[in-house]
Amino acid sequence: GENVEQHPSTLSVQEGDSAVIKCTYSDSASNYFPWYKQELGKRPQLIIDIRSNVGEKKDQRIAVTLNKTAKHFSLHITETQPEDSAVYFCAASRWDSNYQLIWGAGTKLIIKP
Amino acid sequence: EAQVTQNPRYLITVTGKKLTVTCSQNMNHEYMSWYRQDPGLGLRQIYYSMNVEVTDKGDVPEGYKVSRKEKRNFPLILESPSPNQTSLYFCASSSGTRKYEQFFGPGTRLTVL
């Protein structure tokens, strides 16, 4: 079955710098890749997603890139701000999976002032 | 307001004392799911339900039961809780139109002594 690996487990960056979180997946049939953000003490919330027919998607300071050949996708956050501090989860799903998401283990992003 | 609610939010109990964590959504979503979140392990799915009276096991179903008698409710039942079920539990739901965007409840922090 599908397996999603996420790296790094913790990432500390200076405020204003960029942050990149990477995920790899094993099932080449996976075609949907969401990213969720979980602030401390809060619930996970979808922040951006990408489908396999697209190589990159941007939404203001966040972007996701997908490399289907290498089976990896990445979250990029530019001009990081204190409110970006959170745990970020990647996930993967295939079209016939009946709503199922396979989750990465999460990355704790720390923004240093 | 569209939302997923869980009750209780916090619970301390003792080994073997049956408990139920309720989950309710007001968005008419077909899909509902239960996750547990433990440090370093990310989100692990316990059970999910595709619709009323349709439930299936996730990755870590042992020690848990669920039911889906109504579309809006998806309770999680621990018949005989044990200390290894101490965790943060999230309920989530999604619709048929955007079935991979999962909306999470606020979480239930359970401690089993």
Image (cartoon, coloured by chain):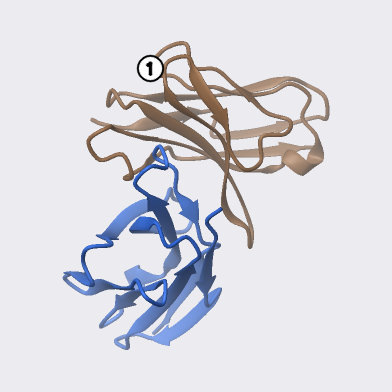
Chain colours: A blue, B brown
Residue B109 placement: quadrant: top right
| Secondary-structure class at tag 1 | loop
Chain identifier of the residue bearing label 1 in the image: B
Up the image or down, B103 lies above or below B66; here it is below
User: What residue is at 48 percent from the left and 83 percent from the top?
Assistant: A12
- For label 1, count other residues whose C-alpha is less than 10 Å away and answer few (under 14), some (14-19) or many (20+): many
Mark 1, residue position: B71
Q: Residue furthest top?
A: B69
Q: In this orientation, does residue A41 appear?
A: no
User: What residue is at 18 percent from the left and 70 percent from the top?
Assistant: A58
Q: Amino acid at mark 1?
A: Lys
Up the image or down, B97 lies above or below A78; here it is above
Q: In this orientation, does residue B1 appear?
A: yes
Q: Is residue B85 left or right of residue A22?
A: right
Q: Position of residue A67 (x, y in %)?
A: 33, 75
Q: Nearer the viewer, residue B57 or B71?
A: B57
Q: Position of residue B32 (x, y in %)?
A: 43, 30
Q: Position of residue B67 (x, y in %)?
A: 55, 17
User: What residue is at 52 percent from the left and 75 percent from the top?
Assistant: A7
Q: Is residue A10 left or right of residue A42?
A: right
Q: Nearer the viewer, residue A99 or B28?
A: A99
Q: Nearer the viewer, residue B34 or A26?
A: A26
User: What residue is at 80 percent from the left and 29 percent from the top?
Assistant: B14
Q: Position of residue A37 (x, y in %)?
A: 39, 59
Q: Is residue B90 left or right of residue A16?
A: right
